Image: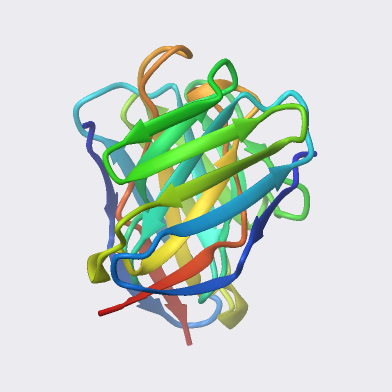
Amino acid sequence: GENVEQHPSTLSVQEGDSAVIKCTYSDSASNYFPWYKQELGKRPQLIIDIRSNVGEKKDQRIAVTLNKTAKHFSLHITETQPEDSAVYFCAASTEGSQGNLIFGKGTKLSVKP
Amino acid sequence: GAVVSQHPSWVICKSGTSVKIECRSLDFQATTMFWYRQFPKQSLMLMATSNEGSKATYEQGVEKDKFLINHASLTLSTLTVTSAHPEDSSFYICSAPKGSSGGETQYFGPGTRLLVL
């Protein structure tokens, strides 16, 4: 089955700097890759997603890139702010946005003011 | 965005009792829902796929007789933790996909925190 690896497990940056989180997946049939932000005790919130027919997607300060050949995708956050501090999870699905999600282990991002 | 609710938001029970958790899609119909479990400081682990009108599909290592899933309608799935034990204490989260395979995404419920004493 699908296996999703996520790095780093923790990331600390200064406010205003960029943060990059990387994930790799094992199943070449995966075609949907969402990123979630989870604050302590709360539900995961979708922040951006990308489908396998696209190589890059951007939404304001957040961008995701996908390399299907290498089977990895990355989350880029620019101009980080203290409120970006949270745990971020990548995930993959072989059935688009309708299928079950296999999650990475998460990255705890701390943005220092 | 769509709304998915869960009830209860938290529950404390004695070891050996059963606990039912409800997951509802409030403004859309969901023929499929997913149940995840999240232990402290860990990731979400898929437990099972709930299918309206048919049996649930369980992930490897998840006991179907212990975690009973019933997808009673197009807007409701329930997870019953039977004979709960302290090791079942966790954060249980459901999700429901909305829309066609070409668009939309999954919406997560707020989660249910279970503590078994």
Residue at 21% over, 32% down = B1
Residue toward you, A42 or B70: A42
Q: Is A2 located above or below residue B102 in the figure?
A: below
Residue toward you, A69 or B16: A69
Q: Is residue B40 left or right of residue B27?
A: right
Rendered location of residue A44, percent (x, y): 38, 53
**Visible in this render: residue B81?**
no
Residue at 43% over, 54% down = B93
Q: Is B60 located above or below residue B99 in the figure?
A: below
Residue at 31% over, 62% down = A80
Rendered location of residue A41, percent (x, y): 33, 70
Judging from the image, the colouring scheme is: rainbow
Quadrant that contains the N terminus of chain A: top right
Rendered location of residue B43, percent (x, y): 56, 62
Q: Is residue A95 left or right of residue B96?
A: right
Quadrant that contains the C terminus of chain A: bottom left
- Most extreme residue toward the bottom is B117
Residue toward you, A81 or B41: A81
**Visible in this render: residue B105?**
yes
Exactly how many numbered labels are in the figure? Answer: 0
Residue at 62% over, 54% down = A104
Residue toward you, B46 or B57: B46
Q: Is A42 located above or below residue A104 in the figure?
A: below
Question: Within the image, what quadrant is residue B19 found in?
Answer: bottom left
Q: Is residue A22 left or right of residue A70?
A: left
